[in-house]
Amino acid sequence: MSSSNPLRDPADRRLPRIAGPSGLVIFGVTGDLSRKKLMPAVYDLANRGLLPPGFSLVGFARREWQHEDFAAEVHDAVKEHARTPFREEVWQQLIQGMRFVQGTFDDDDAFERLRGTIEELDKAQGTGGNFAFYLSVPPRSFPVVIQQLKKHGLADQTRGSWRRAVIEKPFGHDLKSAEELNKVVHEVFAPDQVFRIDHYLGKETVQNILALRFANTMFEPIWNRSFVDHVQITMAEDIGIGGRAGYYDGIGAARDVIQNHLLQLMALTAMEEPASFDADALAAEKTKVLGAVRLPKDLGKDTVRGQYAEGWQGGEKVIGYLQEDGIDPKSKTDTYAAIKVGVDNRRWAGVPFYLRAGKRLGRRVTEIAVVFQRAPHSPFDTTATEELGQNAIVIRVQPDEGVTVRFGSKVPGTSMEIRDVSMDFAYGESFTESSPEAYERLILDVLLGDSNLFPRTEEVELSWKILDPIEHHWDKHGKPAQYPAGTWGPVEADEMLERDGRSWRRP
Amino acid sequence: MKIDLTDTTASKINKALVKGRRAIGTPAVGMVLTLVIVTDEENAYDALKAANDASREHPSRTLVVIRRVSRSPRDRTKSRLDAEVRVGADAGTGETVVLRLYGEVADHAQSVVLPLLLPDAPVVVWWPVDAPLDPANDPLGALAQRRVTDTYAAEQPVRELSARADTYAPGDTDLSWTRITPWRSMLAAALDQVVCEVKGVEVEGEEFNPSCELLAMWLADRLDVPVRRSLSSGPGLTAVRLDTDHGSIALDRADGTVATLSIEGQPDRAVALKRRDTAELIAEELRRLDPDDTYASALRFGVDRLHAQSTALRERGTGELTATPGESAAATKERAAGKAPVPAPPPGKKAAK
C-alpha cells in the first residue's frame, strides 16, 4: 500500500504509522480491562493522530445501553484513565464511529445486529470491512464467541479486507487446554490473524531489552555463562486477589504470571540475536530458547509455592489468601511461585534462571536482574572488599522503568574500601515522561497487522510444556508454604537459593 | 531553586549548576540534549515556557541567550554577562540558564554557550524570532546538530522561505514545517485509502503563512503535479484539495480544530486537526535530531516556482486544476534540471517585493 502512495517516504520520519481504515469490536466492553485500559488506549491513539479517519469502536455487552450511553461510558473512562489530555475535537472525531450492540454471547440476533452494525459502519465511516475483535471475556466464553463470529460470517475476510481476533491471557490452564483453545480459534481465524495480548511485551522497557542487548557492544560479550552467575526475574504485586477470587482460585501465580509474562521476559533475556527484527525471526529465536529450557531434576527442592497469610502490608492490616471472599479455606492455589530452570545451550549451560512471582509481596515491582560472577582474582585484601557484592545489570520493567548497573567503587577516604554503587538510567529522566501505554502500542499493532510483540501458538504451548510438570508435581505433593503478607515470600524460597549459595535480590 | 549571578562567567555558571543540583539532591543527570534558545527579552518568557513544557518529554539543559540592547556608546563598549541558574521545579525536568548579554559579549555568545553544553549530548539551537539568514554558519548555529527557525514569525515569511532554501544545510528545520505534520500525515493516510493518481492540487490558507507554502511545495515535490496556492482568511491552513482520477479528495478545516475529510464515493469523516501550541511543536522537533531530508526537498522546490505554477493555473481558469500533459512534462523536465522555471510575476504581493 505504502509503496504506491507517493506521499509516503521511508525517509520522512515525522509521518507516523497510521492504521488503515478499520474498526475495533470489544466483547466484554463493560469490564475493568476495557474501561481502564482499552478505551483510554483507543483515545490516546486518536489523540496522537495514529488512528485512521473514520475509525470505529463497537462495544458488545449484555447491558441495556444505547449508543449514547456507551459513548458516555467511554467518555468517563477516557477522562479518568487516558494518558494524554482530553481534547474535545479528538473526542468529536471518535464519537462518530461509536456503536453499541446489546446482547449475550449465545444470542444469535445480537450477532446479526453486530453484523448489521459493521456493515453500516463500512458505509457511514468507510472502515472498509477491516475489523479486529477484541475478546475481553472470561476464558470459558472464548469458544462460544469465536463460534458465533464464524456462524454469522463475521470472521470472513472479503475483497482484500481483514478480520482479526485479539485474545487475552489466560491462553488455557495447561498444555492440553491451550491446544484446544488454539484449535478453536484457528478453526475460525488464520494463525496470522490471531493476536495474543501479553501486555508486558508492549512495554517500552521490555522492547528495550532487545535494544540494550543487540544495539550495544558493551553488554553482549558478557551476556553468557562465562560471566553471568545467574539471572533473577521477579514480578511482585503488592495487592491481593481483590475481587478476582473466581478467576484466581485454582489458577495461581505460576499459571497466571510465570507461564506468560515471566517466560516471555526470560526468552527475551536469554535468546540469541534474531536475524532481523521482524515477527518471524523474533518468534524463531524465542521458540528456540523456550524449547531449550530444562527443568530441575528435583522439583520438590527447586520450586517453591506459597500463599499469603494475614499480615501487615505497607501499614495496612490485610487478610490472608484463605480468608479472602470466595476462596475455599482448603485451597492449595499458589499466590507465590518461585522456580529454577536452566537453558540447555552453549551460551547458558550451568546458569540458573530463577523466576518468582507473587501477590502481597513487599512492593509492586517487575525486574530482570542479570547477576555476574565475582572477579576471579582480587588484588584487594578481603577486608577491602567485604562490602562488595556481585556486579549486576538490572532491567526495571515497572515501575520506575530503567536500567541499573551495579558495580564496586572505592569509598572516599584513606583506607582501601570498596562498596557497591549503582549507575542508573531512568526512562522518565532521559525520555518522554509519558511513554505510550502498552495497550496503545499493542492495539495499534493489531490494526497494522504487525505481530512482532505478540506471542505465537508455539510459544504458548512451549511455555505450558515448561510449567505443566511443575504444576503436576505441586498437585501431588505437599501444600503451599504460608508467608506473611507484605514480605518477600516464604522462607522456603530463600532456602532454595541458599542451597545454591545465592540469595534473592531485594528489588 | 534559582541562583542569580551578575557580571559572571561560564565557569562560575557551571559551578552554580553543580551546586544547585547538589542542593536539591539529584546529582545524576539524565538530560538528553542541550537546547539553546536565542531570543530577545520580549520573546524570552514564552519561548522558555514552551521549552520547559517540552522538557517533560525531552529532559534537557536549556540555555536562553538574550542579547540586551545597548542604548549608549558607553554601554556598547562595556561588556557584561548576567545569568540566572534554575534547577529543580523551576526548570521543568531539566536545568535552565538564562543568559543576558550586554555590550560587546553579545556578539560573542558562542564563547559563553560552548562551555555550558552538556558533554556528548546533541545541541539544538532555536531562534523563536530573528533567525540569522544562514543558520548553519551562524556562530551559535555552528555548535548545533539541529537548527530550528520559525519563518512564521518573520516579517516577510514567504521571502524568508526562499532564503532558507538558499542556505539550507542538513540539520536545518523550521517550525512552519513542524506545524503541518498532522496535515501531511492525514493526507498520506487519505491516499492510503484510495489507490488513485493525483492530477492536481490546491492548497488554501491565509496569506503570509509559510506553512501553506511548505505544504504546497511538499505536495508538488512528492506528487509531481501542478499545485495551486490560494488564499483564504484562515485561521492558518484551511483546505487541501486533491484532484484525482477517482474523483476529488478534500481535507477542509474551517475553524482551526476539526477538519472534514471527504473522499469521493466515501462518507465524510471528521478528523481532529487542531493547531498546536509551541511546546508541542518543539517537543516534536526534538524527537528526531537527524537531518530532515523531506523538509529539504520540499523547501528546495522553491517558492517562486510554486507561485509561478499557481499563477499559471489561475490564469487558465479557476475551476480547472488538471494540467495538460505537455505542461506537466515540462515541469518534470525543469525539475530534473534542478531549476525553477522563469518566474511569471508571483501572485503574492509579499513574494513579489
Image (spheres, helix red, strand yellow):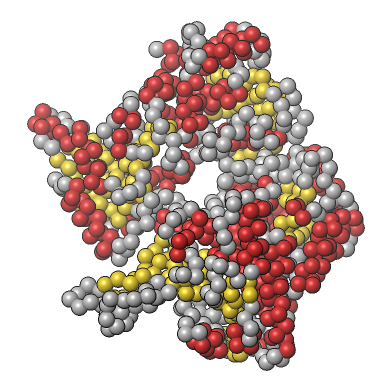
Q: On the rendered image, what quadrant is the C terminus of chain B found in?
A: top left
Q: Residue at x 45, y 55 (%)?
A: A216
Q: Position of residue B26 (x, y in %)?
A: 32, 63
Dividing the picture into quadrants, the one containing residue A455 is bottom right
Q: Position of residue A247 (x, y in %)?
A: 72, 75
Q: Is residue B127 above or below residue A371?
A: above
Q: Is residue A366 visible?
A: no
Furthest residue in direction front, as rendered? A346
Q: In the drawing, does residue A187 fall left or right of residue B323?
A: right
Q: Is residue B274 visible?
A: yes
Q: Nearer the viewer, residue B94 or A415?
A: A415
Q: Residue at x 47, y 18 (%)?
A: B303
Furthest residue in direction left, as rendered? B74
Q: Nearer the viewer, residue A232 or A380?
A: A380
Q: Position of residue A349 (x, y in %)?
A: 55, 72
Q: Nearer the viewer, residue B260 or A376?
A: A376
Q: Residue at x 77, y 30 (%)?
A: B265
Q: Is residue A19 above or below residue A185?
A: above
Q: In the drawing, does residue A224 fall left or right of residue A115?
A: left
Q: On the rendered image, what quadrant is the N terminus of chain B found in?
A: bottom left
Q: Residue at x 53, y 12 (%)?
A: B334
Q: Position of residue A457 (x, y in %)?
A: 73, 62
